Amino acid sequence: MSTTLEQEPFSHAEFAENPEPRCPCLLLLDNSMSMRGRPIEQLNEGLTLFRDELSADNLASKRVEISVVSFGPVEIQQDFTSVQTLSHLPHLSVAGDTPMGEAIESGLNLLRARKDIYRANGISYYRPWVFMITDGGPTDSWQNAARLVREGEQSKAFSFYAVGVDNANMDVLRQISVKEPLKLKGLQFRELFAWLSASMTSISRSNPGDQVPLKNPATPDGWAVAG
């Protein structure tokens, strides 16, 4: 895949202390009632692993920024912040329905605002990743969200990935995601987040415009199968 950087003169304190280019990763995480039990436990363990592995890499900890939006209901659990300044990621509990459309739109608004802050402060950034994990189907209108995803992919504003868990509605995910959605093998959340942290680390070490080879998660020994 390719990564892109954009840039422009800065002032904000956090960027004065850390002027490294940013690699934003937006996590859209389903915490509806159907995730109760082992799925939500494994998801939380995976999140901790994700943070720990990124923190262990000096450059990635400065460049990768994480934001978490949960849905069931939609809630901004963590606004964008560098891993370097992130003491912990939120612990998710299960709640209500699966307002996937609202979650995508809210997350993309959050990402757009963060990119505006980068530009205003002269901070370069790689093409963001939007990574959604769900075990069901949307309980709200999702068509506008799908349109926004298509437009964002087309304009290279971000790369959107969808992962279905257990009984996820893969047909709807195919209509939302331009890239083929992936199906998680069992409850391999730790393996998923280990792959995600390795991917973010690789991208954060790259130069603008580089093709970054990423491990295919859908190989026989990977954590996913093609949707």
Image (spheres, grey):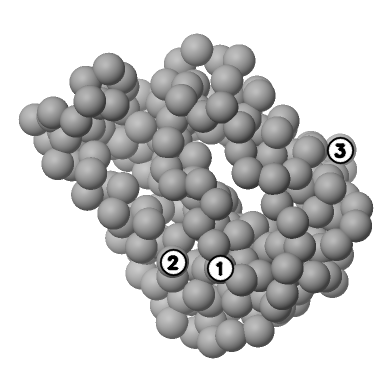
Mark 1 vs mark 3: give the one in front.
1
Label 1 and label 2: CA atoms lie apart by: 8 Å
> Residue 208 lies in what quarter of the image?
top left
Residue 18 in sight here: yes
Using the image, determine if residue 1 lies above or below residue 194. Answer: below
User: Of the residues shown, which amino acid type is indicated by label 1?
Assistant: Val
Label 1 and label 3: CA atoms lie apart by: 34 Å
In the image, what residue occupies the spot 49% across and 84% down? 143
Q: Residue 161: horizontal and vertical position, in percent? A: 58, 56
Residue at which label 3 appears = 221
Is label 1 in contact with label 2 (beta carbons under 8 Å)? yes
Image quadrant where one finds the C terminus: bottom right
Q: Please tell me how crowded label 3 is: few (under 14), some (14-19), or many (20+) other residues with Cα within 10 Å.
A: few
> Residue 99 lies in what quarter of the image?
bottom right
Q: Residue 178: horizontal and vertical position, in percent? A: 52, 66
Q: How many marks?
A: 3
In the image, what residue occupies the spot 18% across and 42% down? 119
Instruction: Say what secondary structure mark 1 lies in.
Output: loop
